[in-house]
Amino acid sequence: HRYGGIYADLDIVASKSIDQLIAGHEALLPLTPNIGITNAVMASTPGHEFFGFVIGELERYSQAWYHASRHITIVSSTGPTFLWSAFLHYKGNASVALVPPAVWGKCTVCHPLCAEMAGAFFRHLSGGSWHTADSKAINNGILCHPILLLIIAVLILSAVRRRVLWVPLATVLAAYVFQERFDVDMWCAPFAWLMGI
């Protein structure tokens, strides 16, 4: 924070000079197709207000009640979900530019072996050394098939209540059929925002 600079995960490799990407920006955060904002690559000028805010939020997020698994603890205490929540709650004046996935080269976790994106500033090596079984369940279940999980949840709730909840079930089934028209972030954004309450 004090000196500013550029951070990239060890599985991120620059495909070309990033001078054009960072030119004219005080801070950069990348968007991903699945989880909103990520901390895989970050750039900042020295002393940027947003990153000061992020540092101030670390302690509060470190002991959150929803740290139910290793994956959730990592992503929500210091990882991408934490950063996304901090961004959603940031009220400062300093600007933060968001870089679209195709510009910086991020594929969806649902298709991790996608081809390198033409013109992207970075490419991704095989990473995820911190991933465990819960990571696979979250990435392949919640992020790749969120509406299917909602269907299962409605069916379980129906079984508990001993009657089918037709309206919620029909709504979720319709959403599943038309899921290509929905942005996955739409399903995850409320969780990221609630983390900061």
Image (tube, rainbow, N blue to C red):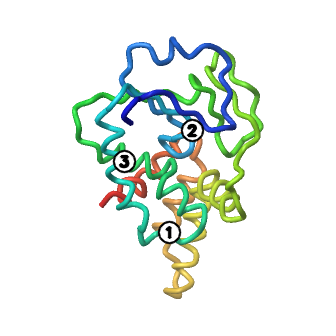
Q: Quadrant of residue 58?
A: bottom left
Q: Amino acid at mark 2?
A: Ala
Q: Is residue 77 left or right of residue 60?
A: right
Circles 1 and 3: CB distance less than 8 Å?
no
Q: Is residue 73 left or right of residue 129?
A: left
Q: Amino acid at mark 3?
A: Ile
Q: Neighbour class for label 2 at 10 Å: few (<14), some, many (≥20)?
A: some
Q: Secondary structure at mark 3?
A: helix
Q: Residue beneath label 1, please? A: 67
- Mark with earlier residue (2, 3): 2
> How far from the left and from the top, in percent, is residue 141?
65, 59
- Mark with earlier residue (1, 2): 2
> How far from the left and from the top, in percent, is residue 59?
37, 60
Quadrant where the C terminus lies?
A: bottom left
Q: Quadrant of residue 151?
A: bottom right
Q: Residue at x 59, y 41 (%)?
A: 180
Q: Residue beneath label 2, please? A: 40
Give the Cα distance between marks 1 and 3. Answer: 19 Å
Q: With respect to residue 68, does 99 lie above or below?
A: above
Give the Cα distance between marks 2 and 3. Answer: 17 Å
Q: Neighbour class for label 3 at 10 Å: few (<14), some, many (≥20)?
A: few
Residue 55: give its label. Answer: 3
Front-lying residue, 133 or 183: 133
Front-lying residue, 99 or 25: 25
- Mark with earlier residue (1, 3): 3
> How far from the left and from the top, in percent, is residue 195?
38, 59
Q: Secondary structure at mark 2?
A: loop
